[in-house]
Amino acid sequence: MTPGPTRFAVTRVDDIQSAFQLFISQPIERIILDMTNLEGRRVFQEKWKSLDQTDLNAYIGILILAGVYSSKGEATSSLWNEENGRPIFRATMSLETFHMISRVIRFDNRDTRVGRRESDKLAAIRDLWDKWVEILPLLYNPGPHVTVDERLVPFRGRCPFQQYMPNKPAKYGIKIWAACDAKSNYAWKMQVYTGKLPGGAPEKNQGMRVVLEMSEGLQGHNITCDNFFTSYRLGEELQKRKLTMLGTVRRNKPELPSEILNIQGRPMHSSIFAFTEKATVVSYCPKRNKNVLVMSTMHTDASLSTRDDMKPQMILDYNSTKGGVDNLDKVTATYSCQRKTARWPMAIFFNIVDVSAYNAYVLWSEINQEWNAGKLYRRQLFLEELSKALITPKIQRRARPARSPAAAAVVKNIKFRPSNQSAMDPVDTDVKKRKRCQVCPSRDDSKTSTSCVKCKNYICRKHTFHSVLHVENIEDTEY
């Protein structure tokens, strides 16, 4: 198994959009479109206009672009604001259309949900989730180290399996078990934690069960995990699958000898090792009266580093491979498309988009290593190009152009752009200049930054419609 994008992925990635749509595939889009149109007709009746793939891609593109602009906490209406908003949003669809889609977007048939929910708390998004996690391992082979840990999707609302995790920044949300490549942070496998079934007993050996399921399909890899998962028995089970384990371990594990638990009188930076045929445990004192316990089935000797703190090699290896899942959380939060919502399936959907966009970036950057090489903001450029590739077809077919000059200029730029020009090229709207309105009397000295996208004459908002009727040669104006 060669680490990196699989042959299946390499042969299907032609551009940035195709990399993303390997994850948000046609079967997933069909579920969203069918269920959303069903709900749209139920809520809005004859007012609802059925969505197609172009509409859905534009909606997702707007979500991603809002994340690029770090608008997670910003009111949606401000993104469409004519003065302080961004023209690309108004050029793609109206705020009313965006709100309508957000209100009715669904991932299952609500008429049959009650029966399915009795045995599956994830029923509202189960079909989409299963199709999505099924594709993750098919597109990327992880490197020698895989990290298994828990994630928390931020959500505060009614959810039958909402968790409180005080050590996470969001505190409340939906817990997801994840296995990520320790180097690239690619999300290789995921599983939503829905709690115990109604009337069921608490799960025993949950940590071991999670690691075994998350590592299924791997061979010859090392699994790095924290003390919630690590145990001697887990190490034995992983060895049967030709996998090794490396992780911190809790002091209350019965297999730990008392000699490595005692820290009284131990000097700082000292290490004590314990060995069996299958595992090695080290007790390291980073400071007086405090020790760190690490168990490994990958290491078989008592090697120490040459650093001043004399850390064991086991701990250095653990520190270098433990961050796969935490780093995934960090990078997805940086440009998250998460919007405020009272529906937990939407919180999961936003996270699916975030993780899919990051995984697509990993595929694209490893397949095209020279693309924007050396730039520190490669991922931002990737997301900008992805979002605009998703929304461009929607802009090109808009029957009713945007009203504001800046948004209309974006529409015109895309509709009449040469085929070899990128959707990323900027639109010069001259909105920073202020000149006298061509319609207002000169004595009023009325100045404006609004200009006609056709003739470039400056026209104040009061006379915009009047000027469209009377200025010559503007039959194709975007107003």
Image (cartoon, rainbow, N blue to C red):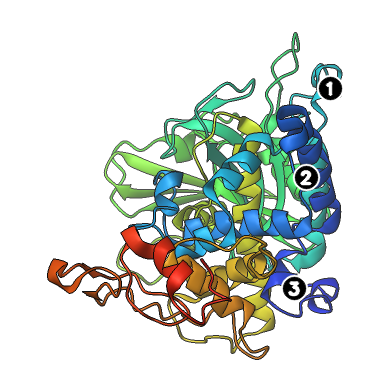
What is the spatial separation of the Cα atoms under label 1 and label 2, in whole angstroms? Answer: 16 Å
Please give the residue where the numbered disc 3 appears in the rendered image: 5
Give amino acid for label 1. Asp
Residue at the far top: name it: 199
**Location of residue 388 with respect to 323 vertically, above or below:** below
What is the spatial separation of the Cα atoms under label 1 and label 3, in whole angstroms? Answer: 40 Å
- Res. 221 image quadrant: bottom right
Q: Are marks 3 and 2 in contact (CB under 8 Å)?
A: no
**Number of callouts in the render?**
3
Residue 345: x and y in percent read: 66, 34
Give amino acid for label 3. Pro
* Mark drawn on residue 32: 2
**Location of residue 265 with respect to 441 vertically, above or below:** above
Secondary element at image label 1 = helix
What is the spatial separation of the Cα atoms under label 3 and label 2, in whole angstroms? Answer: 27 Å
Please give the residue where the numbered disc 1 appears in the rendered image: 111
Residue 435: x and y in percent read: 23, 77
Marks 1, 3: nearer the viewer: 1
Q: Is residue 464 left or right of residue 144?
A: left
Secondary element at image label 3 = strand
* Mark drawn on residue 324: none
Marks 3, 2: nearer the viewer: 2
Give amino acid for label 2. Ile
- Whichever of labels 1 and 2 marks the residue nearer the N terminus, that label is 2
Residue 124: x and y in percent read: 75, 30
* Residue beneath the point at 50% across and 76% down: 378
On the question of residue 125 being in view, the answer is no
**Location of residue 135 with respect to 131 vertically, above or below:** below
Label 1 Cα crowd, 10 Å radius (few <14 / some 14-19 / many 20+): few
Q: Are marks 1 and 2 in contact (CB under 8 Å)?
A: no
